[in-house]
Amino acid sequence: MSSSNTTDFTKPSTFILLGIPGLETAHVWISIPFCTMYIIAILGNFSILFIVKMEQSLHKPMYYFLCMLAITDLVFYTSILPKILAIFCFNYKEISFSACLTQMYFIHCSYVMESGILLAMALDRYVAICNPLRHSMTLTNPLVAKIGLAMVLRGCIVVFPYPLLARQWPYCRTIIIPQPYCAHIAVVNLACADTRVSSYYGLFVQFCVIGMDGIFIAVSYIQILRAIFSLPTKDARLKTFETCGSHLFVILAFYIPGLIISLMNRFAQNVPLHFHVLIVNVYFLLPPMLHPIIYGVRTKQIRGRLLWLFTHKGA
């Protein structure tokens, strides 16, 4: 006998997103910081795009890559936050099968794109610090555009098998997803078939794509730090380090929480489900909000232009 939580159809018309299991009574209160993060991320990233567009002195590879990062963050937030807020505020938990797969695609596509853009930004900092005389000749605008396009295409192509494989599996177990969005592995785990292909491909993307990006970024920063410490004076070292400080903070915010969550998934099996889901949500949603704040506070040109916009009294 089937219950209300199960279905006999191989392709369910809808899934049910639980939000944060065990904290349903607190969903309305949890929505307040989530909504605040959404507003800050939208305003902050749009401000970055506007400032870079208006300020001619910021028309450089570093800020072009920053704009790509801002657009990626906006796509990610738009694909995930409206549905989360609908669940938390209005208890609207249903999502159609096609919409779930579409959301899955944009979530993971944005994640892979962001990793690639961080790698491109590390390349920019490497050339700027280790070979500054050739920076303008090496990272020309056409090359920056090609790198950005390559990162977008890589993300789109690498993640495309996620929904493609998920669509082919039969779903005859529960239609309940114990989190507020359609992550790849959460959907695949509902299938009543051998889904090792999806699981192995997900591991391939995580370790061979995201992991390799992290390795190349680490190698770049090893060379950057070697170049910085070889400078003759402390002032020169500090001034040079400041040019890559913002990017380094963003990298740490992207990779370190992911490593902690991976370790928690593997070794902390007794962690309550609601705590695990909440931590994963914070990990996904916090960096896109922090990016414009980090660059706005630590980048002199952006900070100065932003202050000018708020304080300048035009005639």
Image: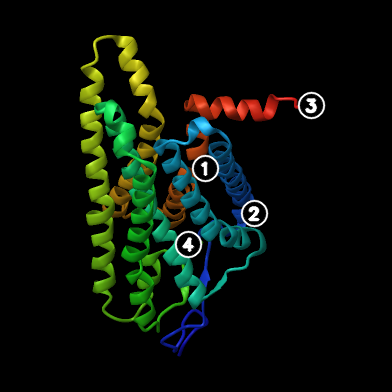
At numbered mark 4, what does the secondary structure look like: helix, strand or loop?
loop
> Answer yes or no: do the residues labelled 3 and 1 have beta carbons within 8 Å?
no
The tag earlier along the polypeptide, 3 or 1, is 1
> Answer yes or no: do the residues labelled 4 and 1 have beta carbons within 8 Å?
no
- Residue holding disc 4: 179
The tag earlier along the polypeptide, 4 or 3, is 4
- Residue holding disc 3: 315
What distance separates the C-alpha of mark 2 from that of mark 3? 45 Å
Q: Is residue 112 visible?
A: no
What distance separates the C-alpha of mark 1 from that of mark 2? 21 Å
Amino acid identity at mark 4: Gln
At numbered mark 2, what does the secondary structure look like: helix, strand or loop?
helix
Residue under the point 41% across and 53% down: 276
Of the two numbered discs 4 and 1 in the rendering, the one whose residue sits closer to the viewer: 1
- Residue holding disc 2: 28
Amino acid identity at mark 1: Met
What distance separates the C-alpha of mark 3 from that of mark 1? 34 Å
Residue under the point 49% across and 84% down: 3
In the figure, 107 relative to 174: above or below? above
Residue under the point 30% across and 10% down: 234
